[in-house]
Amino acid sequence: MNKAELIKVLAEKTNHLGNVLTVIHDIKIPMNNGSGPAVSSHRVGIRTCSDYSPFGVELDGRTVSSGYRYGFQGSEKDNETKGSGNSYSTEFRQLDSRLGRWLSIDLLNHKYPYYSPYQYVHNSPISVIDLFGLGDPLEVMKIRRNKASNLQGAKARNSGTRAHQGFDLYAAPGTSAKAVKNAVVYDVSYSSSYGKTVTLEITDAKGIKSYAFYAHLSAVTVSKNQKVDEGDEIGLTGQTGNAKGQPAEDAHLHFELRSSPNPGLGMSGRLNPNEVLDTKFYSQDPEAINQATVGVLKEQKDGSVIKINLDGSEKIIKNKTNLQNLGQIRFDSSLAREAKDVNGQKYLIVHDLKSQKDFGVVRKPDGSYDFYKKPQK
Ligand SMILES: [Zn+2]
């Protein structure tokens, strides 16, 4: 077993900007205090540690690194041409940390004519991070009361007897609600149950249409047939319709993804909002009969997963570095269980975060994964 295989469990320590300051691994290093031959204590292994200039240059003399991939603001370092920490890759652009400028213009520059298209976080890098999570309806994504019954599901409510057609995302009334994709405003409407609503028509790369539906709004800031870009405000959250008079902790945006614009009641025409959201939510226990007693899992855009309990307590259960993609499935390799088939062939059972199903995989010598058996349709 080589050293790279030994360093399987890594934990990032980050600050308020997401800057990776220290990465510790799970190798215990034996120490000797000089009073005898025995091991007197162990110290934690450090994979990398770094301090950064405001725009992300790794500081001389304050950086010890052995090739960890992520750095300033959690972005992937792009070290080949300019040296370690002098260039970062983000979703859309390259940041030059020595210039404090992007190398290409902002794709949304037509909307912000008063900003230089090369400026980075309004030149306020100590307090502001670059927001790439445009594909969420709210800036802070939280499920109402952290209850799995506020997710979408045919039997989400009333001990498994009632459907919930979308996600209830906690939002104080008046919070800006944003377009989750580039879209056209299909409808602006009012009903006694949903209150003020907006429906966006989204067309994917294959030409397939889906509809993002926002309910209980207090104000609508778009009009029918208007084109909107991902991240544009479509209205303000509220408590209109049957959400009127709910306690403050229940204030929410009811968000649905639909396959047709007016699908009627029940679950027909409803898709799982995770299909369009950047931040995805799952039940901690999809099999539980009473989902109101179950907390949620929040998968963030960088792939890390946080377990959020009903009382609001949180625990990071999946570090982004352990997450693997294989075909349509996505799993945490550190949580894989070993199994053997009747012929003695070893494989790993992994839990797919998207479908919440288990799959068998094998780890290839190069560290990548393959299916043990092809998943059935
Ligand atoms: Zn709802």
Image (cartoon, rainbow, N blue to C red):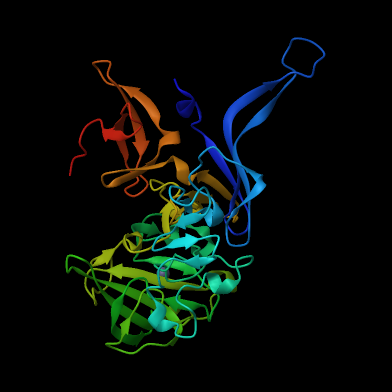
Specify whether 35 is left or right of 374: right
Residue sitting farthest toward the top: 37
- Which quadrant of the view contains residue 359? top left
Q: Nearer the viewer, residue 234 or 264?
A: 234
Count of numbered tags: 0
Question: What residue do we see at 45% from left, 51% from top?
Answer: 78
Eyeballing the image, is 214 above or below 54?
below
Q: Quadrant of ligand 1?
A: bottom left
Residue 281 x %, y %: 42, 56
Residue 95 x %, y %: 48, 62
- Which quadrant of the view contains residue 157? bottom left
Eyeballing the image, is 200 above or below 313?
below
Residue sitting farthest toward the bottom: 223
Q: Nearer the viewer, residue 338 or 145?
A: 338
Eyeballing the image, is 7 above or below 138?
above
Residue 356: tell me if it is visible: yes
Question: What residue do we see at 51% from left, 73% from top?
Answer: 119
Q: Quadrant of the C terminus?
A: top left
Q: Quadrant of the N terminus?
A: top left
Question: What residue do we see at 49% from left, 81% from top?
Answer: 115
Residue 195: tell me if it is visible: no
Residue 81 x %, y %: 43, 50
Question: What residue do we see at 80% from left, 16% from top?
Answer: 34
Residue 296 x %, y %: 48, 53
Residue sitting farthest toward the right: 35
